[in-house]
Image (cartoon, helix red, strand yellow):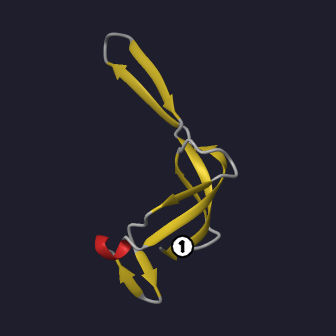
Amino acid sequence: MSVDDVLNIDRVSEEAGSTVTWEPLLVVDDGKVISEATELNGYQVTAEVIGETKGPKINMMKYKNKTGYKKRLGHRQKYTRVRVTGIAAK
């Protein structure tokens, strides 16, 4: 991810227009890869919440032979859409 990327993350309870911050798991800076937890403590990612969205519909079917049992199930995962505003060292 980089600045101005729009991402779908798992749903968070923040309102649209608010700011979300988290610590990254991996940083690539000019070809240098940083993945150790001690070095990553100095980095922070900030993002602006754009709104909520839903993922694709997943259809499931339960069926048991010779009993007449059929059940249709469905699921749509809820996501929060965010725009990355900054990646910086603390």
Q: Nearer the viewer, residue 20 or 77?
A: 20
The answer to whether 86 appears left or right of 31 in the picture is: right
- In terms of image quadrants, where is residue 83? bottom right
- In terms of image quadrants, where is residue 65? top left
Q: Is residue 60 above or below residue 89?
A: above
**What SS does tag 1 mark?**
strand
The residue tagged 1 is: 87
- In terms of image quadrants, where is residue 33? bottom left
Tell me the crowding category of disc 1: few under 14, some 14 to 19, or many 20 or more residues within 10 angstroms, Cα based: some
| Residue 46 picture location, percent across and down | 56, 64
Residue depicted at 59% across the width and 45% down the height: 14
Q: Is residue 74 above or below residue 56?
A: above
Q: Is residue 67 above or below residue 42?
A: above
The answer to whether 32 appears left or right of 53 in the picture is: left
| Residue 12 picture location, percent across and down | 53, 45
Q: Nearer the viewer, residue 53 or 89?
A: 89
Q: Is residue 65 above or below residue 84?
A: above
Q: Amino acid at mark 1?
A: Ile
Residue depicted at 59% across the width and 61% down the height: 47
| Residue 5 picture location, percent across and down | 62, 67
Residue 32 visible to the viewer: yes
Residue 36 visible to the viewer: no
